[in-house]
Structure formats: C-alpha cells, structure tokens
Image (spheres, grey):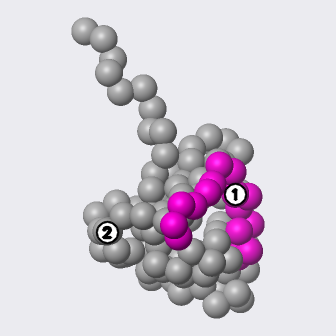
Amino acid sequence: TAVMLRKIAFTMYPVIDVARARGFYEGTLGLKAGSHGQQDGQWWIEYDLPGGGCLALTNATPSRPSEAAGGTVAFEVDDLQGLVADLKGKGVTFRSDIIVTPVCRMAVCVDSEGNALLLHQLKAQ
C-alpha cells in the first residue's frame, strides 16, 4: 500500500498581535522569516529551521493561541540550559523547570501570544 503522508509540511500557530509575535520569534528566539505576506491585515509568516521543519504564524484563522490546545511545537536545541537562562533573562515565561528523561532534557515556555513551546535537547549518544 502506498504511503499517503510524506512529511509534516509545517506546523501553524495562531497569533493575535503579529508585530509582537514577530518580535518574539525573530528578536527573542532569533528565527529568520522566510515566505511571508499579508492581505487586508491577514498575515502568514513562515520560519524554516536549519535542520528541517517549518513553523508558520498566522492571524488569518479564528483559532486563538493556547498553551492547552493539545499540540506543542518542540524545537531541538544545542544548549538547553544556556538557552533557558538566556530566555528567562529576556522575560520569557517558563511552565516547567528542565525535565530530565533517560534520552533527553526539555523545558516548556510560552510565546508572546500564549502558545506553548517545548525546548528539547537529546542526550549525547
């Protein structure tokens, strides 16, 4: 039987204040906007990550930001402890301390709009 689903094309998060959200993702997290545009104030902004994956932000849906929406974007990072300290210094709200599992460490924070983000670092093999 043929594989119908090939990959996750993008993950989308709703935003309320586009300028504030872009400030968070581009300024605070250091992501670079890729494909983006707006029509009548309805924005779509994509952030392609160097190792693969794409996060899209939009205010063009009736969805509202929520850290309890049931889905969470997890970003793979190189230095979880350093990043958590840096983001806390920039005023980012964390919902957990660093959680340690046998294979990884992770921490959950909230973006400027109220969406949950998980920062994840695999342990060295």
Dot 2 lies on which element?
loop
Q: Quadrant of the N terminus?
A: top left
Separation (CA) of disc 1 from disc 2: 23 Å
Residue 52 placed where, x, y %?
Answer: 62, 40
Work out which residue is located at the far top of the displayed protein and give it: 1
Q: Kindly identify the residue that appears in the image at 53 percent across and 80 percent down.
A: 17
How many neighbours does mark 1 have within 10 angstroms: few (below 14), some (14-19), or many (20 or more)?
A: some
Q: Which residues are magenta?
A: 26-41
Vertical comparison of 99 with 33: above or below: below
- x 28%, y 64%: residue: 70
User: Compared with residue 9, is residue 28 higher up or lower down, i.e. above or below?
Assistant: below
Tell me, yes or no, if residue 41 can be seen here. Answer: yes
**Residue type for callout 2:** Pro
Residue 118 as seen in the image, left or right of residue 26 = left
**Quarter-wise, where is residue 32 in the image?**
bottom right
115 vs 45, nearest the viewer: 45
Q: Nearer the viewer, residue 37 or 82?
A: 37
| Other residues around mark 2 within 10 Å, as few (<14) / some (14–19) / many (≥20) | few
Amino acid at dot 1: Ala
Q: Earlier in the sequence, mark 1 or mark 2?
A: 1
Residue 33 is marked as 1
Is residue 6 shown above or below 36? above
Q: Nearer the viewer, residue 125 or 106?
A: 106
